[in-house]
Image (cartoon, grey):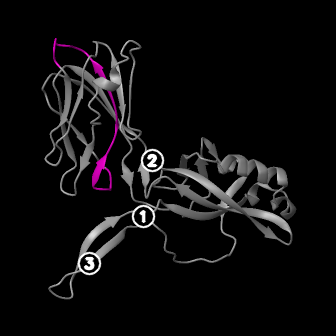
């Protein structure tokens, strides 16, 4: 990491007169996680000395440790490089959030659109009895980073397919947030949204809606809400197949088809396998 600044929960480290630093003075090559630390289960075959993969998984979320200190360019003397108890308290109140992940972005070239959901723990770095910095350990909610959200908005005609591409680094699937505003309704017809990708066989179905109503399906949280106060039967009118975006190594194209005219807004954060 070559950055001097970062943004967390809408505030910057430089707002506190601080910068990212390294106190041990070591330099040169280092090895850091890039957010793709997989654990492989291997099983030896009965036919010989060959090992197959029995399972592969991410066993932990991404973590990183770095240090911060006062920016010497903003201080008048070496004495002012030490941190007061009030400054330590202010920094830890900002960074060390209990039971809450907030957006973290590093100020480094190439990382402008990459973020992690983060909370921190902090240790004080002391020299001759005075605190000169903090060592921060960053805890995230996933094994990798994410890109800024991508929003795809479509006005869909009945039974006319439309494409969405999942540009994540991680093959598999992601649950986007999907907002459907109904522009027509046919008596006795249940609204369906189908992903016709080769590896997907799920149909999202909603009934008892009204024209003009907007229903939001948050796949990450597995929640469904409506703009209509009158649609109190929504939990029973939904089949709980949240739409997914499929991404294989060979193909990241998703083909969706709605059976009724509607406006659809799909929002998702692509996975990025990068580290600090």
Q: Residue 249: x percent and y percent?
A: 22, 58
* Above-or-below relation of 153 to 81: above
Q: Residue 223: x percent and y percent?
A: 39, 33
- Was residue 186 drawn as part of the magenta stretch in this picture? yes
- Was residue 197 drawn as part of the magenta stretch in this picture? no
User: Circle 1: is it few (<14), some (14-19), or many (20+) Cα within 10 Å?
Assistant: few
Report the front residue among 119 and 150. 119
Residue at the image position 16 percent from the left and 49 percent from the top: 199
Number of numbered discs visible in the structure rendering: 3
Give the residue number, with chain letter if any, for mark 1.
Answer: 59
Marks 3 and 1: which is nearer the front? 3
Q: Is residue 87 left or right of residue 60?
A: right
User: Circle 3: is it few (<14), some (14-19), or many (20+) Cα within 10 Å?
Assistant: few
Residues in magenta, as a range: 168-189
Give the residue number, with chain letter if any, for mark 2.
Answer: 113
Spatial separation of the CA atoms under disc 2 and disc 1: 26 Å
Report the front residue among 208 and 107. 208
Spatial separation of the CA atoms under disc 3 and disc 2: 40 Å
User: Circle 2: is it few (<14), some (14-19), or many (20+) Cα within 10 Å?
Assistant: few
Give the residue number, with chain letter if any, for mark 3.
Answer: 43
Secondary structure of the residue carrying tag 3 is: strand
Residue at the image position 33 percent from the left and 16 percent from the top: 213
Decide which of tag 2 and tag 1 comes sooner along the chain.
Answer: 1
């Amino acid at each position: 990491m070559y950055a001097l600044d970062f943004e967390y929960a809408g505030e910057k480290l430089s707002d506190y007169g601080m910068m990212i630093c390294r106190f041990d003075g070591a330099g040169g090559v280092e090895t850091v996680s890039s957010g793709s630390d997989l654990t492989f289960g291997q099983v030896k075959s009965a036919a010989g000395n060959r090992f197959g993969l029995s399972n592969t998984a991410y066993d932990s979320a991404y973590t990183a440790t770095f240090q911060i200190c006062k920016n010497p360019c903003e201080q008048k003397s070496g004495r002012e490089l030490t941190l007061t108890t009030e400054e330590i308290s202010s920094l830890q109140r900002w960074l060390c959030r209990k039971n809450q992940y907030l957006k973290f972005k590093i100020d480094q070239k190439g990382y402008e659109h990459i973020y992690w959901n983060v909370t921190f723990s902090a240790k004080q770095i002391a020299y001759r009895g005075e605190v000169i910095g903090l060592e921060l350990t960053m805890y995230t909610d996933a094994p990798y980073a994410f890109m800024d959200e991508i929003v795809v908005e479509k006005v869909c005609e009945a039974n006319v397919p439309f494409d969405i591409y999942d540009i994540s680094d991680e093959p598999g699937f992601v649950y986007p947030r999907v907002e459907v505003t109904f522009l027509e309704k046919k008596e006795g017809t249940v609204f369906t949204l189908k992903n016709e990708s080769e590896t997907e066989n799920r149909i999202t179905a909603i009934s008892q809606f009204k024209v003009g109503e907007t229903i939001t399906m948050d796949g990450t949280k597995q929640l469904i809400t409506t703009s209509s106060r009158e649609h109190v039967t929504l939990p029973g009118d939904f089949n709980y197949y949240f739409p997914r975006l499929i991404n294989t190594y060979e193909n990241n194209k998703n083909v969706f088809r709605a059976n009724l005219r509607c406006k659809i807004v799909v929002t998702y954060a692509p996975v990025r396998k990068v580290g600090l």
